[in-house]
Amino acid sequence: MPSRRSAGYEVAIMALLVLFWGCIGLNRAGIGFIFPIIVPLFHMQFWQAGLLISGTSITWAFSSWIGGWVSDNRGRRAVLLPAIAFTALATAAMGATWNFLSMFVVRDLLGLGDGIGWSVGQATISADTAPQRRGLNQALYNAGYSFFGVGLGALIVTSLATSLGWRWVFPIIGAITGVIFVALFAVMREPSSSTDRRRIEWRTALGLLRGRSVLLITLMGGATLAWLQLSIGYNVLFLTRVRGFSLLEAGTVVSAWGLVGTAGQVLLPLASDFLGRRPVVILSAMLCAVTLAIYLTVNLDISGMRLLAAASGFFGFGLGPIVIATCVSEAVPMEMCGAALGMTNFFAVVMGTALMPVVGGIVADRFGLAAALWLAVGAQILMAGLMVGVTETAPRMVGEVRRRRRLSGTLL
């Protein structure tokens, strides 16, 4: 249990895992930031640009589930570290691609390491941090993606692509990932809760979908990932081609989206600890939808676009760790945490990041780039509706309900 680890170890492992997940954000979101360069260079249509996101998501989905299950049975360290090393190599290889097909193949391979990083990384945090900090630490891990991958990443990638050329961007990210691998290899120990491990069949996790809440959470995961990947895939193109901003100006808008979104990824899960998962998710999803709708319909200057992007990012990014990490972890037995995170992520990724970017590209080709982002608005509205049917899992709220029931029984 987490009590067997020192506070210093928890801080060290969290810092390295957050940095690792930030590199995942850079290699995942970074492709969208260079679309204005490589779409014309590789003579791609928008649906092909969507496939560069979706292809990674297919392999991510399978590796997330399988990696989570294997780590439940074989250990987190033995699965996570090789995945990080492979991610570093695949990320660097993206700079050597020469056309759509070669980029598609490399992106597919990249998804193998990225997917394992999600389920095994979150399961490691769940096992090796104190229970009272579990929700916060899982949110911080998720925030690494938005802070480094989107917030700083939008500025880093667009600046590097402008000054050095886009081919240097991904080898640099791959090298940073390699450094993190070396540090984790030296620091990471097998989570103590893994010492008494009973074998978990991968199909066992499927049975969890018979529960209404787990099924709805999985569908909500697909919706939140659809919002994320549609925004990453088509927002910079929308800003440069529809609104007429430069690539660097578009980078500042997306940076505001990601940086303020990082604050949302910490503050909204924290609020949900006190107010409950359901009200925070429902309200945040609706506010995200409203701000994004205004962003698409009102013709504002660059400052106004940054402000609306920041508001949409705060509410949208803040939903991710609640829906696809904390709610899942709280709804299943701890010994099945890795498999459950991988299984729910599998279906959410297939729906949200494999299917929807391609659908968005087809819609953009036929109806314009703004139409693809309207799908992201719809995803947030869908998520708010689905959350109505989910049972509350926040420990404080559940404990309060039980206390009131005991008190009621005593009075009767």
Image (cartoon, helix red, strand yellow):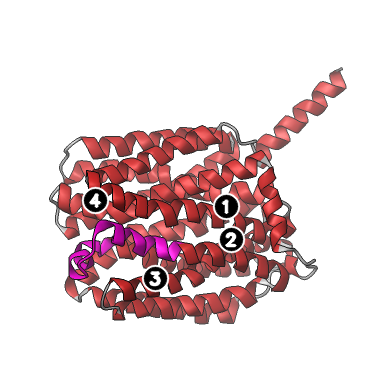
Q: Is residue 302 left or right of residue 62?
A: left
The answer to whether the residues at label 4 and label 2 have Cβ atoms under 8 Å apart is no
Q: Which label sits in the foreground, 4 or 2?
A: 4
Of labels 1 and 2, earlier in sequence is 2
The answer to whether the residues at label 1 and label 2 have Cβ atoms under 8 Å apart is yes
Question: Identity of the amino acid at label 1?
Answer: Ala
Question: Identity of the amino acid at label 4?
Answer: Asp
Q: Looking at the rendering, in which quadrant would you find the C terminus? A: top right
Rendered image quadrant of residue 67: bottom right
Query: Residue 226: which disc?
Result: none
Between 76 and 141, which is closer to the camera in this rendering? 76
Look at the image and tell me whether residue 401 can be seen.
yes
Of labels 4 and 3, earlier in sequence is 3
Mark 2: secondary structure: helix
Q: Residues within 10 Å of mark 3 (few under 14, many from 20)?
A: many
Q: Which label sits in the foreground, 4 or 1?
A: 4
- To which residue does mark 2 refer? 122
Q: Position of residue 92 (x, y in %)?
A: 36, 79
Of labels 4 and 2, earlier in sequence is 2
- To which residue does mark 1 refer? 325
SS majority, magenta: helix
Between 331 and 191, which is closer to the camera in this rendering? 331
Q: Position of residue 307 (x, y in %)?
A: 26, 42
